[in-house]
Image: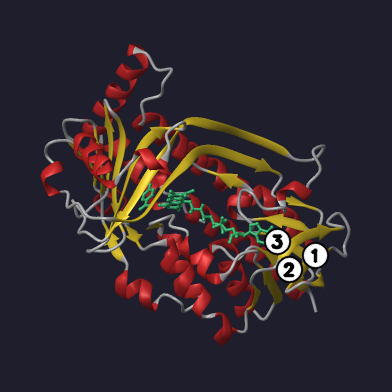
């Protein structure tokens, strides 16, 4: 039997594991952290239709359907007005607000029933012989050395995991840039200030009003990377949000104690190729987007869709071409999502190097978007996710 070894049990690894198990493909997932640790990472909140469709296909969408909030639009704010992007009207679709934590929990909870083997707290995970047809992975569990022989290894181990680093520098290329700011996020059990998301470009900086449910809000402000979390007591974040979201929104902000606060750096990276020998990469292990377009988790889902398709063809029919074609197929969608995330980041943040010209360009672009259905349609089409 063709065994697939998946490294990392974040959303990419678990989703891929379930898709393979649903087709009867033998696989094992190795995760460095504990289930509780994985669930404690507060990250994405917006699901594209394709991500929702994958959960539906697995029959793991009961909670998502019951608790996910369907959003037919979102807003760009420029300090004075709200520009509503009516995604339902413009492209006949929607996004679903459902936390990455919840999606991961649903995938985790279904492990046993679906026969998906996940080894948590696997230490020193190391990939071997990825350029051969007989790669293997070694790790240590409870102090005992273990080895998994596989036909294909899939790296779903995030931006800092070991898989990508196994690809030799002579083969791999990293296209990337770091941004001079990070997002300071606050999660609180208070009702959202608006029924839809608001991305604001204010002279004091960027702000995002997001949510996890009707009683749980998620907000962000951008801060220089030199800022320390301890210099941002809750009240300072709430004050800053009120200023940046503007006078029309501020009165609707309900303040409350933070359940979680963190600063996430913003970066854009694409690593090519996404397959080398018997190793495939999915999700953040191959690329990172700044969170501005809500694309990271959703890109992980589309990679996994392509990878599962290729691996099922390979495991069931011995079709090696499908595996060979994976990188180009996945990258074609990845680059477009990278472009969208980068351009929305450029439009909605004040960069330290920007002068009056760059600012005027932002104002002109926001003006254009406000007045053009074509411009709004392009944004909406990208926001709900390009087809795959
Ligand atoms: P993950 O989630 O990082 O999971 C990788 C897993 O691999 C494990 N791992 C290892 N396992 C074994 N051995 C090792 N040596 C290992 N090293 C690492 C890790 O413990 C982990 O469990 O990657 P994955 O699965 O590719 O998923 C990607 C998403 O998590 C990420 O793209 C999103 O969270 C990005 N993102 C957003 N995406 C969206 O689609 N919509 C959003 O609204 C959105 N908002 C966000 C975000 C990311 C953020 N941060 C903090 C980066 C908001 C924020 C603030
Ligand atoms: C979130 O709710 O965490 C979130 C929403 C939209 C984004 C990024 C993050 O673009």
Q: Is residue 17 visible?
A: yes
Q: Position of residue 40 (x, y in %)?
A: 46, 63
Point 23% across, 31% down: residue? 78
As measured in the structure, the alpha-carbon distance from the residue carrying label 3 to the one carrying label 1 is 11 Å
Indicate which disc, 3 or 2, sits on the residue closer to the N terminus: 2
State if disc 1 and disc 3 touch (CB < 8 Å).
no
Q: Position of residue 7 (x, y in %)?
A: 68, 63
Numbered mark located on residue 154 in the image: 3
Q: Position of residue 146 (x, y in %)?
A: 81, 72
Taking 133 as reference, is 270 left or right? left
Q: Nearer the viewer, mark 1 or mark 2?
A: 1
Above or below 19: residue 214: above
**On the image, numbered disc 1 is attached to which residue?**
137
As measured in the structure, the alpha-carbon distance from the residue carrying label 3 to the one carrying label 2 is 6 Å
Indicate which disc, 3 or 1, sits on the residue closer to the N terminus: 1
Element on which disc 1 rests: strand
Element on which disc 3 rests: strand
Categorize mark 1 by other alpha carbons within 10 Å: few (<14), some (14-19), many (20+): many
Categorize mark 3 by other alpha carbons within 10 Å: few (<14), some (14-19), many (20+): many
Above or below 342: residue 219: below
Taking 44 as reference, is 311 left or right? right
**On the image, numbered disc 2 is attached to which residue?**
5
On the image, which quarter does residue 14 sit in?
A: bottom right
């Amino acid at each position: 039997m063709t065994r697939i070894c998946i490294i990392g049990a974040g959303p990419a690894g678990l989703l891929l594991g379930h898709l393979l198990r649903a087709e009867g493909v033998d696989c094992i997932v190795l995760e460095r952290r504990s289930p509780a640790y994985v669930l404690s990472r507060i990250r994405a909140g917006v699901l594209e239709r394709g991500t929702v469709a994958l959960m539906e296909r697995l029959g793991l969408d009961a909670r998502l359907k019951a608790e996910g909030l369907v959003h037919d639009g979102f807003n760009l704010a420029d300090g004075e007005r709200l520009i509503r992007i009516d995604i339902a009207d413009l492209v006949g679709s929607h996004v679903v607000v459902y936390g990455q934590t919840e999606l991961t929990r649903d995938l985790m909870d279904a492990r046993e029933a679906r026969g998906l083997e996940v080894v948590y707290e696997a230490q020193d995970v190391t990939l071997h012989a990825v350029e051969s047809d007989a790669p293997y992975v070694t790790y240590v569990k409870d102090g005992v050395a273990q080895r998994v022989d596989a036909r294909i290894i899939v790296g779903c181990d995030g931006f800092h995991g070991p898989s990508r680093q196994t690809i030799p520098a002579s083969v791999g290329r990293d296209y990337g840039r770091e941004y001079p700011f990070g997002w300071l996020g606050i999660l609180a059990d208070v009702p959202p200030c608006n029924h839809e998301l608001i991305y604001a470009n204010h002279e004091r900086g960027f702000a995002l009003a997001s949510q996890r449910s009707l009683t749980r809000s998620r907000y962000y402000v951008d801060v220089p990377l030199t800022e320390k979390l301890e210099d941002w007591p809750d009240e300072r974040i709430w004050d800053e949000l009120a200023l940046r979201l503007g006078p029309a929104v501020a009165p609707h902000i309900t303040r409350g104690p933070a359940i979680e606060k963190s600063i996430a750096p913003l970066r854009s990276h694409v690593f090519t190729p996404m397959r080398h020998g018997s190793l495939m990469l999915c999700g953040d292990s191959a690329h990172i987007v700044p969170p501005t377009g809500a694309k990271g988790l959703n890109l992980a889902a589309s990679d996994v869709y392509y990878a599962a398709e290729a691996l099922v063809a390979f495991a069931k029919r011995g079709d090696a071409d499908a595996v060979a074609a994976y990188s180009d197929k996945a990258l074609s969608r990845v680059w477009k999502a990278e472009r969208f995330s980068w351009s929305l980041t450029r439009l909605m943040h004040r960069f330290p190097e920007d002068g009056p010209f760059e600012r005027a360009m932002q104002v002109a672009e926001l003006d254009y978007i406000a007045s053009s259905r074509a411009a709004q349609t392009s944004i909406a089409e990208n926001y709900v996710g390009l087809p795959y």
